[in-house]
Image (cartoon, rainbow, N blue to C red):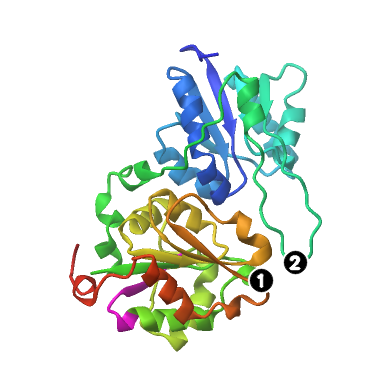
Amino acid sequence: MFGRKSENILIIKTDGLAAFVAAEPVFDEIRRANPDAKISLLTQPGLQRIARAAPYFDQVAAMPDFREAESRKAFVRQLKSAKFARVYDLSADENSRRLYASMGPFRPKWHAATPAPRKKRKGPAVPQTPELAPALAAAGLEAPTRLPNFGWATTARKDSANMQPAWFGISGAFGLLLPGSDSARRWPAKNYAELVRLMAREQIMPVMAGPKELHAFGDEISQEAPEVVDLTGKTDHLQLAALAQEAAFFVSDAAEEVHLAVSVGCAGVIIRKAAEAGAAPTGRHVVTLTAQGDLGEAQAEFVWRTLSNMGLIPDRRAAARVSR
């Protein structure tokens, strides 16, 4: 069923950056099937900027705090006044279920993803992605099989100067270090610091990026390896996508940002615990190294050799160039 020009469609995707990246082909399919419809996205506040740059949505809003009764009621009234013909709930989480209940008996057609099964396991939780195919099938759409492609993110902003590596003082060949926010699933600072030293020795600028919550972790690394360029908290998602597209490689662990890097074609190494290997991006030029116990078992020298075997280490002359 293809959308009519007057039709309003709502997409709900509020479950984090990695899930947002994974759903990019689905956003594309919904827009392709409804070229003249007005499509709105409901997402997390931190994802609004990159979502507004996407070519799939006419407007973007953030999910309200459902603990605040007045703001919730006002938001539901606003949604009802928009007269959405259909809702694609691609998160299938508690907030979207509350929103569904709040819309009452005259709610629009609601196509909900199948919630991810809750696995009982020891250790930190690994994010699970809802099954999106049933929601699309119910609307007469096929689930796309292509991998996410955020190439549009690198050219979406008019102030292109601050999308260039030089804006951050980066010159020549560089590699991206993308530590995760969860300390229990993060490669240790001493390992990152050793990798920084290996990169600097080969004249490849080590650039660390991620949310501002990682600033203290960046300080740990810089104390051992002052060569690192610490951009934690200094890049938005669009800038990070642009940097990843220019980087020689990335090294990451459980960072959600690695999904964005992979989606623009950046290749590299992901370090995970064996039980979590399935949560890493797959299908592209990515190697996942797994540790049975402590992530510190994955030595920086081994990671470096893996990058070299993948053909991702520029030679010294190329690495020393001011620009490519």
Q: Is residue 88 above or below residue 263?
A: above
Give me the C-alpha separation between circle 2 and circle 1: 9 Å
Amino acid type of the residue that numbered disc 2 sits on in the rendered structure: Gly
Q: Earlier in the sequence, mark 2 or mark 1?
A: 2
> Tag 1's secondary structure?
helix
Q: Is mark 2 in CB contact (under 8 Å) with mark 1?
A: yes
What residue is at 79 percent from the left and 65 percent from the top? Answer: 122
What residue is at 53 percent from the left and 53 percent from the top? Answer: 281
Does the magenta segment cover residue 188? no
What residue is at 36 percent from the left and 44 percent from the top? Answer: 151
Amino acid type of the residue that numbered disc 1 sits on in the rendered structure: Ala
The residue labelled by disc 1 is 184
Q: Position of residue 18 (x, y in %)?
A: 55, 50
Q: Is residue 168 visible?
A: yes
Q: Position of residue 117 (x, y in %)?
A: 76, 45
Q: Is residue 59 above or below residue 321?
A: above
Q: In this view, which residue lies farthest toward the bottom? A: 224
Q: Quadrant of residue 124?
A: bottom right
Point out the stretch of residues depicted in magenta: 200-209
Q: Is residue 78 visible?
A: no
Does the magenta segment cover residue 205? yes
What residue is at 33 percent from the left and 62 percent from the top? Answer: 247
Q: Which of the numbered marks, if any, corresponds to residue 131?
A: none
Q: Position of residue 279 (x, y in %)?
A: 61, 55
The residue labelled by disc 2 is 123
> Tag 2's secondary structure?
loop
Q: Quadrant of the C terminus?
A: bottom left
